Image: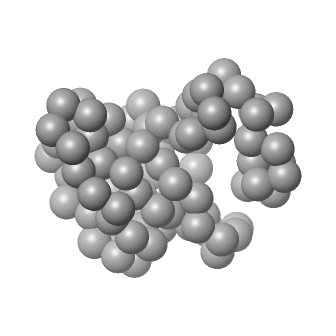
């Protein structure tokens, strides 16, 4: 988390797994997915994660819930989830 917040571009293309806690749902767009704010168990600072439609279609996020997620840092430093399941 610390490396990402210092310089997200340095992590471009890397894949990670983490336990994430729901902080806020920033919205849904059909065919694109859901933009979420999460924090990690190690760091309470929120990070934005794009949950593509294929990943988020059957998940109902509620503030405070925790999920185990796999994600990748893509262009511009945005984090995209590749898999997600309730913890």
Q: Nearer the viewer, residue 23 or 84?
A: 23
Say which quarter of the image contains residue 25. bottom left
Residue 63: image location, x then y, percent: 35, 76
Total residue callouts: 0
Q: Nearer the viewer, residue 48 or 58?
A: 48
In the image, residue 33 above or below residue 64: above
Q: Nearer the viewer, residue 77 or 38?
A: 77
Residue 31: image location, x then y, percent: 18, 31
In the image, residue 1 above or below residue 39: above
Protein image colouring? one colour
Report the side of 55 relative to 15 (left or right).
Answer: left
Q: Residue at x 48, y 48 (%)?
A: 49
Q: Residue at x 52, y 54 (%)?
A: 48
Residue 40: image location, x then y, percent: 60, 64
Q: Tell me the quarter of the image containing the N terminus.
A: bottom right
In the image, residue 44 above or below residue 59: below
Say which quarter of the image contains residue 12. top right
Q: Residue furthest top?
A: 13
Q: Residue at x 33, y 56 (%)?
A: 86
Report the side of 59 relative to 38 (left or right).
Answer: left
**Residue 87 in sight:** no
């Amino acid at each position: 988390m610390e490396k990402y917040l210092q310089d997200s571009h340095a992590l471009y293309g890397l894949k990670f797994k983490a336990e994430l806690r729901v902080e806020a749902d920033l919205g849904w767009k059909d065919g694109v997915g859901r933009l979420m704010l999460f924090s990690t168990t190690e760091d309470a600072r929120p990070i934005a994660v794009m949950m593509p439609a294929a990943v988020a279609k059957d998940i109902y996020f509620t503030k405070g819930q925790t999920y185990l997620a796999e994600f990748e840092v893509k262009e511009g430093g945005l984090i995209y989830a590749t898999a997600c399941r309730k913890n």
